[in-house]
Amino acid sequence: MSPFFIVTTSRRPSRRVRRFCKELLSVIPNSVKVNRGKLSLDDLYLKALELGGKRVILVSVLKGNPGVISFYDVNDGLLKLFPWMIVAGVKFFFEQEGRRNFSANGLAVRFYDVSLERVAASLANIFNCVFFSRDEMVDLSPDTAMLNVRFSLDGVLLSFTDTLNLPIGPIIKIKKFIFGDG
């Protein structure tokens, strides 16, 4: 089965960015990492076609840390998908208490505030999955990873949990979402 998601980095990734991508692979089902090396975006498009990928997740470096997460659709070239995310910080899976090793076979997006519904809907579109409010009852398989979207004191937190709300992946603090409409 060919991967749906191709996860890659900017050209000269730091150790933290490589680790972050590895953790994303563990919570995004049907994904594979491609080492970018000297590949241009056009070369990356050809690599995605070769692997049968439908989406590309590109993690860029800012001061040695994950700085921007951008998404592309593999179509007639790489087409930008929104939102792009400006990352303020990352807490890795191994740094969290109560964590649980998990093999995700599905993904769902859960949002905790009605003002985050647009972000949740956009992420669900990118990840080709369902999204719902934390107040809704949704019947999910126990091997579904939850991408939780909630406010923090100074931004938005994206966290990955299992259906029992135990940590299974990184926590990403987002400073800003960039939508294509300005």
Image (cartoon, rainbow, N blue to C red):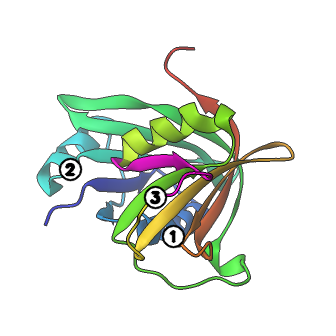
Residue at x 66% of width, y 62% of height: 171
Q: In terms of secondary structure, what is the magenta stretch mainly?
A: loop
Closer to the observer: label 3 or label 2?
3
Residue 59 appearing in the image:
no
Q: Which residue lies furthest to the top in this view?
A: 182
CA separation in Å, label 1 and label 3: 26 Å
Q: Nearer the viewer, residue 28 or 135?
A: 135
The residue at which mark 3 appears reads as 138
- Crowdedness of circle 2 by 10 Å Cα count: few (<14), some, many (20+)? some
Please state if 20 lies on the left or on the right of 8 as rendered: right
The numbered disc on residue 173 is: none
Q: Which residue is drawn at 30% across and 45% down?
A: 55
- Using the image, tell me which numbered label, if any, was put on residue 47: 2
Q: In the structure shown, which secondary structural element does the residue marked by tag 2 occupy?
A: helix
Q: Give the CA distance from mark 2 to mark 1.
A: 22 Å
* Mark 3 neighbour density, 10 Å: few (under 14) some (14–19) many (20 or more): few
Looking at numbered disc 2 in the image, what kind of residue is underneath it? Lys
Residue on which disc 1 sits: 23
* Secondary structure under the numbered disc 1 in the rendered image: helix
> Which residue lies at the image location 47% right of the left edge and 42% below the top edge?
123
Q: How far apart are marks 3 and 2 (CA)?
A: 36 Å
What is the total number of numbered labels drawn onto the structure image? Answer: 3
* Range of residues picked out in magenta: 128-137
- Foreground tag (2 vs 1): 1
